[in-house]
Image: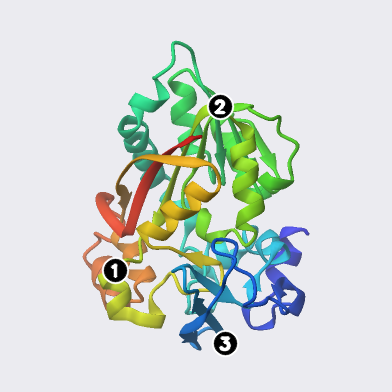
Amino acid sequence: MAKDDQDQITLDALPPDYFDQDDSDNVCFLCNKPDYKTLFEVNHFEFPFVFKQCQCGIVKQTPMPNEKFFNWFFNSSAFFDVKKTENEEIWGYYDYFADESSRISTSTRRYKKFKHIFESLDRPMSIMKIGPATGTMLHVAKQNGHQVRGCDVSSRFAEYARSNYSVEIDNGRFEKMNYEEGQFDVVLLFNVVENVPNQAEFLEAINRSLKPGGYFISNYVDMENNLVEKFQKSHYFIYRPPICYTYTKQVYHNILNKFGFDVMEEQRDVRHMHLEKISTLLRWKWLLKLTKALKVSRINFPIYAYPSKMVVAKKR
């Protein structure tokens, strides 16, 4: 689908086949014994949808967005630059490409944080990043001598990463690609896992692509005792159509264990952000106006946001 065609699709007129209308509560990829209850009915977007919680703790969106939705979404203005649209509800980012300095700082911080993993062998590592976005993390790893590769459903991201950082990006869904068994030493997954509808197939593909003893480094938004979620309830930014699943620490660890990974370490995910992004995610228009007036809306600073956790897991 060409970009112009993608942007012709409006948020209030998404094709029905972008969602699995027959998505059933009789399926839970984690426990296989679902007992769902409604957590939130979300009515402030262009159409209503529901987040339901299974007895095992995992929370899913219903109806579930599917592959067609994400192929559209991650190539559209609804994701990249909501400020250019008339939509007040942010499904993606206010202005994605304006945040590149934040991503460079975050990627540099993350590499240093896991330097003991990346440099644990006596040779350069083969690193795959799923959903590499503009390619900053791969760029930092490449500068440190590693062999890097990415896979992204967004052709706009793939083109940007190739043009600006000269990193190899495959365009498509990771689980549909023909990567060799045991091809990578490390698979990275940042700010992606919540957006994967077919989690079992996806995680099995990650495990298969890793060498024995290889590392899977990922992050997730921790919903356990999440004070922002408790305050904002259904208006919390995580409850929006691109999100398929949400997790607590225990649920996420259970998922990793089920799909053949042992958790080695977990820590807070500190990333670089600015007040323009924070205020738009939280829907605090007053803060956005104030910080713009004071000309401080785009000053980057490190923050423990969302709150997000980083997990290092090892292939069993």
Indicate whether 280 appears above or below 38.
above
Residue 294: where, in percent of width, then height?
21, 65
Number of other residues with Cα within 10 Å of mark 3, as a class: few under 14, some 14 to 19, many 20 or more: few
Residue 203: where, in percent of width, then height?
59, 48
Number of other residues with Cα within 10 Å of mark 1, as a class: few under 14, some 14 to 19, many 20 or more: few
The residue where tag 3 is placed is 48
Task: Answer left or right for 172 relative to 93.
Answer: right
Residues marked 1 and 3 touching at CB (< 8 Å): no
Disc 3 element: loop
- Residue lying furthest left: 294
Label 1 and label 3: CA atoms lie apart by 24 Å
Which of disc 3 and disc 2 is earlier in sequence? 3
In percent of the image, x 36 and y 76: which residue is there? 283
The residue lying toward the viewer, choosing from 176 and 255, is 255
Please, what is the three-letter code of the amino acid marked with disc 3?
Answer: Pro
In percent of the image, x 71 and y 29: which residue is there? 180
Residue 34: where, in percent of width, then height?
56, 73
What label sits on residue 226 in the rendered view?
1
Label 2 and label 3: CA atoms lie apart by 44 Å
Number of other residues with Cα within 10 Å of mark 2, as a class: few under 14, some 14 to 19, many 20 or more: some
- Disc number lying in front (2 or 3): 2
Task: Give the quadrant of residue 158.
Answer: top right
Please, what is the three-letter code of the amino acid marked with disc 1?
Answer: Asn
The residue lying toward the viewer, choosing from 124 and 263, is 263
- Disc number lying in front (1 or 2): 2
In percent of the image, x 73 and y 41: which residue is there? 177
Task: Answer left or right for 147 relative to 94.
Answer: right
Disc 2 element: strand
Disc 1 element: loop
Which of disc 2 and disc 1 is earlier in sequence? 2
Label 1 and label 2: CA atoms lie apart by 35 Å
